[in-house]
Image: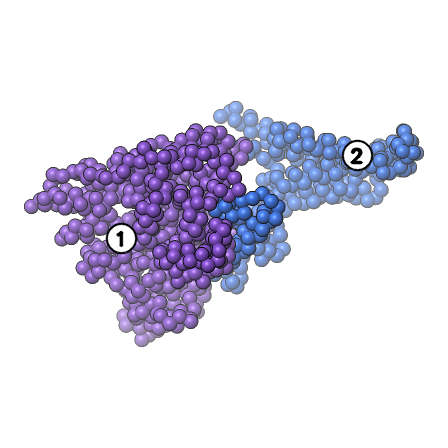
Chain colours: A purple, B blue
Amino acid sequence: MAILSIQNLSFTYNGANRKALSGVNLEVEKGQFVVVCGESGCGKSTLLRLVKKQLAPKGKREGSILYNAQLEGAGNREQGTGIGCHSEQSEEGPSFHCALTDVEDMDERVAVTDIGFVMQNPDNQIVTDKVWHELAFGLEALGEKPDVIRKRIAEICGFFGITDWYHKNTSELSGGQKQLLNLAAVMLMQPNILILDEPSGQLDPVAATEFIATLLKINRELGLTILLVEHRLEDVFPLADKVVLMNKAEILLCGSPREVGLKLKETDPQHKMRLGLPAAVRLFNLLGAAGECPLTVKEGRDFLERTYMPEHTEISEERPDGKNRAAALEIQDGFFRYARNAPDILKGLSLKVYENETLCVLGGNGAGKTTMLKILSGVKRVHQGAVRVWGKKIKDYTGGSLYRENVALLPQNPQSVFVKDKLIDDLREATALMSLKREAGDAEIRALCDGLGIGSLLESHPYDLSGGEQQKAALVKMLLLRPRILLLDEPTKGIDAYSKTVLSDILKRLKAEGKTIVIVTHDVEFAAQNADRCAMFFDGRIVSEDAPAAFFAGNTFYTTAAYRISRGFYKNAVTVEAVAELCGRNPKKL
Amino acid sequence: MKSVRAFETYHPLTLFAFFACALVICMFTLHPVLLAVCYLSGVGFYGMLAGRRKLAASLARSIPLTVLIAAVNPLFVHRGETPLFFLNDNAVTLEAILYGAAAAVMLMSVFYWFKCYNEVMTSDKFIYLFGRVLPKLSLILSMALRFVSRFKRQYREIDDAQRAMGMYASKSLTDRLRSAFRVFSALITWSLENSIETADSMRARGYGLRGRTSYNNFFWRRRDGFMLAFIVLTAGAVIALLSAGRAGFGYYPTVTPIGFSVYDLLCYGALTVLLFMTVLLEMKEAVRWRYSLSKI
């Protein structure tokens, strides 16, 4: 019997005329790991929020969300009086045994403890200044005695490995630690169902993988039921007991990962979610292969070995060599530190970016990649070494000439670009800076916004846009300054797979217009698809650089999933498309 | 590396009682012996807490300041019966000089004891103490501290982003002010926007349910009882003796002699024991630690 049973659920937000959810049916068994995916705006967040009483959005709800408290050993907890009994829904047991409650009618206390909810932004969820206080927050609210709280915190700190930073300030933690803290703070209340709304969206890939591993540990070792919404499916997809694919307020597909991977192709081969699936599944779909769908890198390798003869093993790359072109940006032996007594962040960094190339700089957290962009955009100055833009020293650009028709930086958080209440006002600021007349400026704004598909959002508040839209809007503001060099800091952070391909297309168009692009990213797949050249940043400088195929084919760990699948079979196929192309050329094994 | 500290491991209540007594006594005494005790113990304790190098740097700045403050008094106050010389037809008296010096040393000892307070009474201890009086207050303070650090960080982020677009790149004051205003107004929107999610997170974890308790990391041990008794006894003795007019001292019109009656000595002794106890504790800890290290 299901612990959570959603029956014929429809939901309309107050003031909206379109249904955010329509006719959703979903059964979640006890102990299941359920992954919900779908493009942004498909209603998956609404669905999750409706399950948590305290977060349920305001609007018109039809159908029911039934929670079965009795299934878990809820006996050790005092049960609230609110656990009513809907005898007409409980067909199985006699009425005294049933504990099916609609989430709406749950007792406040039970709703707080039994259903845990973790949101996307690690920072916004943290309430207090100290780690220990944050952990205690929920239990304090429930009125537990300090001795009980201490015992539970001790337990949880051991499980999550928080002991080392138990006394720290929450502001000192890394993004991954913050999200782990949020998870631990929720787990302290001993929930029966854990709901997570894109918890790894704001984390770098390493921290995201660690977070997912922790979730898996909770699921496997504690048997906790988990309901997870995710964009990055590479890690989660193979682990799920059940995958729910949502599309336009409805559930499109629901089943085991293998089933969904297979069925998606049959139902809608052009579906946007296809792009977010793990590399092995995408490869399988691209090849139109039959049989069992591979999910992991390992299964993907088996699939390749089983299916294709290794005759053609190399893919020719026709990326132009830019080294004979002029250098757009150049750093020579740059040293930088934030304070006099602080350690050097950049240690003899040397880098050349050639005109009209796309350079991707990859590397771990805190290696100094963002700092490098600050140097290149003139926000910070090196204390040793030379920085040149178009061969001219960066400090010789005075009075904003560095930023007009020259260099523009798109920061990691696009929100920090906006300072006005309406998007159009923000963009007009940029046209004013270019000394354009109102009409001419507005015409340019309209042209750019329409080109990026955000023309209808000009009157909105910048903060009301979705993550992907915000990023496009920020990009428009940059482009209004008509830059020749674009610097992008982690542009793929927190946006879904489809938005990534849109961004990819935009970047290709900009490059065709002759712009020079530098991207700092963690996203190896994105780099493999978009870069002319990749560079590895480590310990304050660039340690290796090469064309993407050679770059990723030279790495064993820090490389794309597609290459990990094809390594040993093919020499330099680093994208799923390249692997599929090579497969297509090779004859099939019998 | 943070050095091993002994005194700060006591319960916040004990610590707060100590600092309250020490600061009050320091503030209200101008008696040369008591001043010397306050100043030396304050500087000594700060040295034990912050390390020799930081102490030296701080003294290098504070001693000239002490001299400056001391010099101001005789320039404006001409009371006292022992003129040393005349400046612009005004007598500069010995009494005024001594009084200025005493006031300067008093200020400095308060300054150093406050520095020690800052090192020892961290925000969580303070919050814990006052959270017991007003349970909501401790949460509000904790949230405020978190908010301030986020606000500062976001200010820098927005400011950097704006500068990287060449907004208000000139160095003129009006431009800088306008730029700061723009960033600030954006920050307000940002914090309102993000606080919605924080409120959600609080509600999801049961904020607003009845019967909230307050958790803390502090334990009251037996030694806290002893320490508190010691503080109450010594500080009580000093304050009682002072308010009974013992260990009195006057600068005007002439400097009175330093008293050495039994009561006076008792007062000096009690204050010395009270304030130097901290220094001794830290020294004992340092020695014990070194000794136990050498055994390892």
Asked whether the residues under marks 1 and 2 belong to the same chain, the reply is no
**Front one among A247 and A176:** A247
The quadrant in which the N terminus of chain A is found is bottom left
In this view, which residue lies farthest toward the bottom? A88
| Residue at 7% over, 46% down | A590
Q: Position of residue B217 (x, y in %)?
A: 54, 47
Instruction: Kindly indicate the quadrant of the structure image that contains residue B277.
Output: top right
Q: Residues within 10 Å of mark 1 (few under 14, many from 20)?
A: some
Instruction: Between residue B164 and residue A241, name the one nearer to us.
Output: B164
Circle 2 Cα neighbour tier, 10 Å, few/some/many (<14 / 14–19 / ≥20): many
Q: Is residue B30 visible?
A: yes
The residue type indicated by label 1 comes to: Leu
- Element at badge 2? helix
Q: Is residue A80 left or right of residue A284?
A: right
- Quote the CA–CA distance across marks 1 and 2: 76 Å
In the rendered image, residue A309, in percent from the top left (x then y), is placed at 11, 41
Q: At x 70% / y 45%, what residue is drawn?
A: B20
Vertical relation: A357 (above or below) A417: above
Q: Please, which chain is the residue tagged with disc 1 on?
A: A
Location of mark 2 (residue): B70
Q: Position of residue A199 (x, y in %)?
A: 38, 52
**Residue where numbered disc 1 is placed:** A275
Closest to the observer, A470 or A196: A470
Instruction: State which chain disc 2 sits on.
Output: B
Picture coordinates of residue B79, whole percent (x, y): 90, 37
User: Within the image, what quadrant is residue A198 found in?
Assistant: bottom left
Q: Is residue A151 visible?
A: no
Judged from the image, the secondary structure of the residue bearing numbered disc 1 is: helix
In this view, the mark in front (1 or 2): 1
Q: Are marks 1 and 2 in contact (CB under 8 Å)?
A: no
Instruction: Please give the name of the residue rendered at 74% of the width and 44% of the height, measured from the top-left corner.
Output: B24
- Residue plotted at (58% across, 43% down): B171
